[in-house]
Image (cartoon, rainbow, N blue to C red):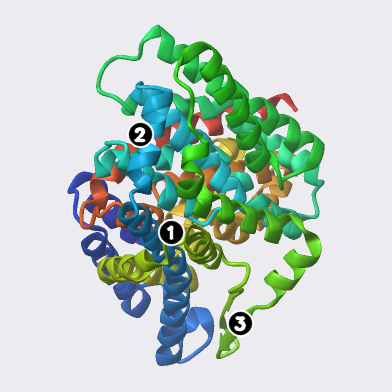
Amino acid sequence: MPILLAALPLICVLIGMAVLHTSAIVAGLAGFAIAAGLALFGPFDLAEAVSLPLRAAATGTLAEAAHSTLTILWIIFPALALYAYQSRVGAIDRIRDALAGLTDNRRIQALLIAWFFGLFIEGAAGFGTPVALAAPLLLGIGYSPIRAVTLALLGHAAGVSFGAVGTPTLAQLELTGLGAEELAGHVALLHACLGWILLFAMVRLADDGPITRSELGWTLLAGVFFFLPFLALAYLAGPELPSLAGALIGTIIFVSVLRQLGSNKPLALRSLVADLTPYLIIVALVLATRLIEPLRAVTSEAALSWSLFEQFSGSFAPLYHPGTLLWGGLIIGALITQRTNAIAPATQEALKRLLVVSLALFVMLSLSRLMVQSGMITTLADAAATTGTFWPLFAPAVGVLGTFITGSATTSNILFTELQVSAADALGLPETTMVAAQGFGSAIGNIIAPHNIIAGAATVGLIGKEGKVLARTVIWCALYTGLGGAAILVATQLL
């Protein structure tokens, strides 16, 4: 019974968004009401779980939710402002026209933006940035808001385990002490074997007609050009570069082949320099703060931290945060291109769209922190571990659960990696394989996490219809997770 009760808030959110197509706010409020009832009157006593009076426990839980909301909004706000700015100066239209000049094929355009661009930004920045940036570009070339967000979510997910220069996997290494190349290689192998599901799902959804033989060929090339360097870099260099460098290498090769074989139209890059300047600066800032170690140390260590009742805490590194880098790209790009007069109206436009997004994020994150602090998440994970020899089949689902609740693959890994290690030790399973299962599951969980859907939907003006996006991604998440679990089960039986 406690297991069923612990799952009730999540079931409510899933049914509300995926089946009833309610907004994230409505579904989240319903789930939060159930969780609050269980934390106050049911078996998950919040005050007892954190050893504090109820008022202090509730205050701390909501404080953590507010902190997470603000840090996520610091990505959404500049992403909205950047899109509004680019629209005002005509950059979106020109980039769209340039893509159309390279290829008229909708599916190949989706490969360029949702797949390669999304994976590159995921590898460089992570934390929802690729969806926030790719979805508006897809909208700009003619996709509907729902389809744009769905394509962006599917396109970047295979690289999430190594997003933000490897942050989710680096967190696992910190917790376990496993070998970097070994763990990264295991995770990358799972994605390289099954990431094709996401790639073909994205290509299929990118247009209404059947996939032609030519489109199938370009899709296969896009997968090969990304997954080969992705896998090699994971085994050779560890978790920092597979997504970032894999996408960069893949993009260069793909565009070169496309121009040689698939298009007789030149890509007028010179005419787009001013329009691409904000994005190029963002990439430069991200690479500098992630890969130049002295700068990385300075920016990441300059953090603002807080704690409450010695139980709740939060930290924010403003110079290292992707949102700050987005602002840097926007402002510096506008200064260089002498388009600063568009910044103020673009910022005002972005602010108008933040209110509903802020509320939806706060509701979902409040539900997340309440379930974590009251022990509901631990109850669900512990129950899954009792499946014995079939545990490898379900292990990725724990990663999915963590990301669905927290909206972060890194947080999911921090929550559940040690559980995976304990289960592996108890059942005599290889630790690296089971920790890789956690990393694999936490990555795919991004395509159904309400927080990510809300963030992506906000950048394309899709407010109150987030459930329609979830309804399109949940089936692919289930398939990816199930096949991943089956692969891990077979691997553990053979090892």
Q: Quadrant of the C terminus?
A: top right
Instruction: Check disc 3 and give the amino acid type.
Output: Leu
- SS type, badge 1: helix
Residue 161's image quarter?
top right
Q: Are marks 1 and 2 in contact (CB under 8 Å)?
A: no
Camera-side residue: 7 or 71?
71
342 versus 247 height, above or below: below
Q: Which residue is mark 1?
A: 405
Q: Residue at x 25, y 49 (%)?
A: 467
Q: Residue at x 80, y 54 (%)?
A: 177
Q: Which residue is mark 2?
A: 97
Camera-side residue: 365 or 236?
236
Dot 3 surroundings within 10 Å: few (below 14), some, or many (20 or more)? Answer: few
**Mark in front: 1 vs 3:** 3
User: In the displayed structure, does residue 87 sit left or right of residue 103?
Assistant: left
Residue 288's image quarter?
bottom right
First-in-chain label (1 vs 2): 2
User: In the displayed structure, does residue 153 sit left or right of residue 303?
Assistant: left
Q: Residue at x 63, y 67 (%)?
A: 320
Q: Which residue is mark 3?
A: 304
Where residue 180 sits in the image (x, y, percent)?
79, 46
User: In the displayed structure, does residue 316 sit left or right of residue 188?
Assistant: left
Residue at the extreme top: 213
Would you say residue 1 is visible in this rendering? no
Instruction: Check disc 2 and give the amino acid type.
Output: Asp
- SS type, badge 2: helix
Dot 2 surroundings within 10 Å: few (below 14), some, or many (20 or more)? Answer: some
Instruction: Check disc 1 and give the amino acid type.
Output: Ile
Q: CA distance from mark 3 to mark 2?
A: 43 Å
